[in-house]
């Protein structure tokens, strides 16, 4: 129930920004971003509690909850990814100058890259050992990583170059990861072509 309620909160926050970004004060935009970050962090913390996850799975089994109605594992993974993706969309929009009352540009860019790096770093252990945590998590996190790579590919070249030193090692690890889904590999190839290719000597 909590997860469903919070997913509605995430959805409504995204709608509020999409409809009113032109008139939202900077403080209100900060509150939207802060709430999305808090929801994502709460969901990630719940997903990291192995004991609670095992207890939930056992309780659903004991209660004979139909498979189609059970919470997946991790139980709040969809919530975590939806909140993070909504935050990414807003930061990307702010970075491209889409908001009337934009936050300080340097702060937006730093937070945008921090979120992208966090998403990639969280996915890499799973991609390196895909069988350890299940196909569902690989698929869902893979979709979030593909969106992140697409966002990085869409950025202006100067912004990408400012953060290239932090991004490159993660991209190299993604290239070497055996468990990357096809959509991640495609988005990674597009990013390398768009942002990394022009940096290489002719």
Image (cartoon, rainbow, N blue to C red):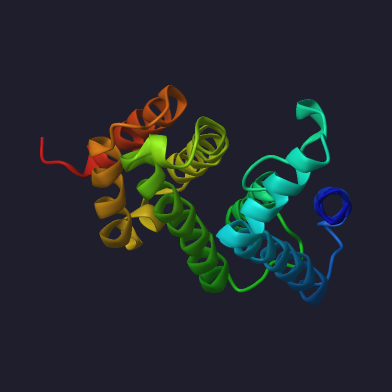
Q: Residue at x 49, y 41 (%)?
A: 145
Q: Position of residue 169 (x, y in %)?
A: 25, 53
**Observer able to see residue 82:** no
Image position, residue 148 (x, y; %) = 50, 44
Tally of numbered discs: 0
Above or below — where is 4 with respect to 38? above
Residue drawn at point x = 80 percent, y = 51 percent: 14
The extreme bottom residue here reads 27
* Quadrant housing residue 84: bottom right
Q: Nearer the viewer, residue 130 or 147?
A: 130
Image position of 197 (left or right of 19): left
**Quadrant location of residue 186?**
top left
Residue at image location 47% in from the left, 64% down from the top: 114
Q: Position of residue 9 (x, y in %)?
A: 86, 55
Residue 44 in sight from this viewpoint? yes
Q: Is residue 90 above or below residue 28?
A: above
Q: Give the side of residue 137 with respect to residue 33, left or right.
A: left
Which residue: 58% across, 36% down? Answer: 140
Residue 62 shown left or right of residue 181 in the figure: right
Q: Residue furthest left?
A: 202
Residue 166 in the image, given as x and y percentages of width and height: 31, 61
Between residue 73 and residue 95, name the one nearer to us: 73
User: Where, quadrant-wise, is the C terminus in this rendering?
Assistant: top left
């Amino acid at each position: 129930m909590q997860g469903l309620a919070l997913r509605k909160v995430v959805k409504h926050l995204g709608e509020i920004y999409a409809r009113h970004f032109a008139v939202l004060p900077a403080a209100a935009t900060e509150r939207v971003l802060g709430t999305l970050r808090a929801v994502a962090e709460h969901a990630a913390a719940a997903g990291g509690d192995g004991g609670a996850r095992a207890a939930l799975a056992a309780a659903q089994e004991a209660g004979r909850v139909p498979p189609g109605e059970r919470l997946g594992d991790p139980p709040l993974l969809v919530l975590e990814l939806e909140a993070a993706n909504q935050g990414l969309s807003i930061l990307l929009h702010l970075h491209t100058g889409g908001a009337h009352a934009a936050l300080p540009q340097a702060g937006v860019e730093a937070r945008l890259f921090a979120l992208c790096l966090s998403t990639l770093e969280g996915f890499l252990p799973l991609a390196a050992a895909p069988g350890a945590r299940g196909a569902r998590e690989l698929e869902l996190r893979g979709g979030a990583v593909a969106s992140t790579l697409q966002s990085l590919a869409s950025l202006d070249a100067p912004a990408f170059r400012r953060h290239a030193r932090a991004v490159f090692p993660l991209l190299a690890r993604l290239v070497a990861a055996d468990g990357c889904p096809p959509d991640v590999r495609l988005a990674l190839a597009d990013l390398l072509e768009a942002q990394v290719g022009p940096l290489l000597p002719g």
